[in-house]
Image (cartoon, rainbow, N blue to C red):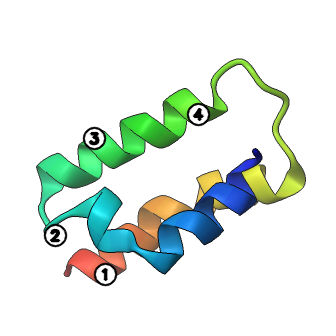
Amino acid sequence: MDLENLIKVLKDRPGIYMGRKNRCTLNNYGMFLQGFLTGKERTPFEEAFLKEFPEFVRAKMM
């Protein structure tokens, strides 16, 4: 599974994976994604995602 497919799965039921909106959960989620991407060649989508995701999260949390 690549990151794009993983995001589609997570998008359908974010509450199961993300829980409440708090920084601890987001930190754990970020660590999960980083672990998922460690040791594999990244696709262009994954590279773009890694650049844009932190700002997306900041905007949603504010």
Left or right side of 4 for 32: left
Q: Secondary structure at mark 4?
A: helix
Residue occupying the far top of the picture: 39
The structure residue drawn at horizontal position 72% and vertical position 60%, both measured from the top left corner, is 5
Residues packed near mark 4 inside 10 Å, few (<14), some (14 to 19) or many (20 plus) = some
Q: CA distance from mark 3 to mark 2?
A: 12 Å
Q: Earlier in the sequence, mark 1 or mark 2?
A: 2
To which residue does mark 1 refer?
Answer: 60
Residue flagged by tag 1: what amino acid is it?
Lys
User: Tag 2's secondary structure?
Assistant: loop
Q: CA distance from mark 1 to mark 4?
A: 23 Å
Indicate which disc residue 21 carries. Answer: 2
Q: Amino acid at mark 3?
A: Asn
Pointer 4: what residue? 36
The answer to whether the residue labelled 4 contacts the one labelled 3, judged by CB atoms less than 8 Å apart, is no
Q: Quadrant of the N terminus?
A: top right
- In terms of image quadrants, where is residue 49? bottom right
Q: What amino acid type is highlighted by mark number 2? A: Lys
> Element at badge 1?
helix
Count neighbours of disc 2 (C-alpha within 10 A) and say few if under 14, some if 14 to 19, many if 20 or more.
few
Which of the labelled discs sits on residue 28, or is there none? 3
**Residue drawn 87% across the image and 54% down it:** 44
- The amino acid type, in three-letter code, at marker 4 is Phe
Q: Position of residue 2 (x, y in %)?
A: 76, 47
Give yes or no for contact between labels 1 and 4 (Cβ–Cβ under 8 Å): no
Lower sequence index among marks 1 and 4: 4
| Residue at (44% x, 68% y) in the render | 55
* Location of residue 16 (image quadrant): bottom left
Position of 60 with respect to 47 (left or right) is left
